[in-house]
Amino acid sequence: MRHVFAKLALSALALALTSAAQAQIYADFTVSHGSTPLGTFRAKLEYQKAPRTCANFIGLATGRRPWIKVSSGQIMENKPYYNGLTFHRLIHNFMIQGGSPNGLGTDGPGYVIQDEYDATLRHSGRYFLSMAKSNLPGTGGSQFFITFEPSPSLDDKHSVFGEVIEGKAVIDAFTNAANFPTDRTAAGAAPGDPAYSDKPVTPIKMDSVVISGLGLESFDLDNPALGLPVITRTPLVGTRNNANKTFAVTFERGFQTEHLITYSTDLQNWTYLRNIRSADTVEDFTYTMTGVTFPRFYAASARIDYGFLPNPPSAFLPAGSQLRLLDRSGKAMTLVSNGTGGGTWNHSNGSSGNLTSLTTADGSVSTGFFSNASSSAHLFPLAQVNATFSSAAGPDAWTSLGLILSFHSAKTGWVEGSAVKGSGSVAVQQSFAITP
């Protein structure tokens, strides 16, 4: 009987392992160096732990997700995004980065997505795929990097979403500066020299990125709960005033949307002009372009809907409210507002004290619009908190805090910032919750 139970247990384990293997999703990258094929490496995508990030990546890679050619404003549909793009940045003892259509690292798919963190997804060694972004939360879109070494400082700041599991030799080869020189290494320049961008001298290209795996069938890339922007076209009504050399476009400005305005003089070639970030809905909004002297002039607009993002109120920490910061070890620091620019603090270790200052700022107003030279949609869910402690606070002896809060719901989200500790500062990358 004991042997029967043992066999049943082994059968159940084998079935579980088989089911887990069958539910995987993979990305196969076929790459080349100039005209030299380098082969293919396979990454397992952590779609169950990083569903938003993986849905975005898979949607772009397969062409199932629309994206915007930012230089022209053209909405690209059913067109795989990554095929033909380069790895534009290579630091041989750190990582390799790609996913920028212009090859400079300054663009993306025309929209941004919120960050996504799982406690088990760490930059713990070589071969991990993670999202690139600026120094602000929620600024990633399509650019990603693959690690060459453990990089714990990136944990909970960049979204890990996969790991290379086959073809690792391709990744290993990129660490060789002699075989894959960059503008920096070829010039013998120092790591911090801003005159160099770490761009490979000979392009390293993603010839194709192919998504496969049995988990793909059941993974709903269009689930609204993923919180991905929706891209559509904005109907425009144009009015030209030759005497004033202006061209005005009237359209419905949407709630928490960005309208990417482009223009053309021949309906063939389109040029990016402006991003209109709209906080609220206005039915007949007019935007006027000046200095229009072309014989023919046309305008178009792509619309990116971020209406699902929580936008905190301007007074998100009124008197009596508490901002609780929770780190991965379970330690909590709570700031309590008095509503007049100060308050108190307490820590889960039992210590407490006063705040000599506590100030807040909302990242985006709830009405009006902003005209920008590039996207600023990442500001919708952001807020800022600065605090000064009357004395060294908590077990880490913080004396002040400077935090950017990214709201993932009305009262919770993720913090990126720093704390002053003694004569230096430390990164603060934690979850937060506001009560009541």
Image (cartoon, grey):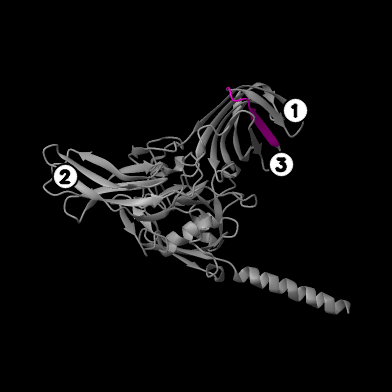
Q: In this view, does 263 lie to the left or right of 310?
A: left
Question: Which region of the structure is painted magenta?
Answer: 332-340
How far apart in space, not on screen, are marks 3 and 1 (Cα)? 15 Å
Q: Name the residue that disc number 2 marks.
A: 240
Q: What residue type is labelled 3?
A: Gly
Q: Looking at the rendered structure, which numbered label has been put on residue 330?
A: 3
Q: Is residue 206 left or right of residue 22?
A: left
Please provide percent x and percent y for residue 335: 65, 30
Q: Is the magenta stretch mostly helix, strand or loop?
A: strand
Element on which disc 2 rests: strand
Does the image show residue 357? Answer: yes
Q: Which amino acid does label 1 sit on?
A: Ser
**Quarter of the rendering containing residue 378:** top left
Instruction: Give the mark, 2 or 3, whose residue is nearer the N terminus.
Output: 2
227 and 340: which is toward the camera: 340
- Whether 152 is among the magenta residues is no
Q: Name the residue that disc number 1 marks.
A: 351
Q: Find out whether the residues at labels 2 and 3 contact each other: C-beta distance under 8 Å.
A: no
Please provide percent x and percent y for residue 214: 55, 71
**Quarter of the rendering containing residue 332:** top right
Labels 2, 3: front one = 2
Does the image show residue 86? Answer: no
Please provide percent x and percent y for residue 315: 53, 32
Element on which disc 3 rests: loop
Instruction: Give the mark, 3 or 1, whose residue is nearer the N terminus.
Output: 3
Q: What residue type is labelled 2?
A: Arg
How far apart in space, not on screen, are marks 1 and 2 (Cα)? 66 Å
Q: Which residue lies furthest to the right in this view?
A: 1
Depicted 237 relative to depicted 20: above or below: above
Please provide percent x and percent y for residue 423: 61, 23
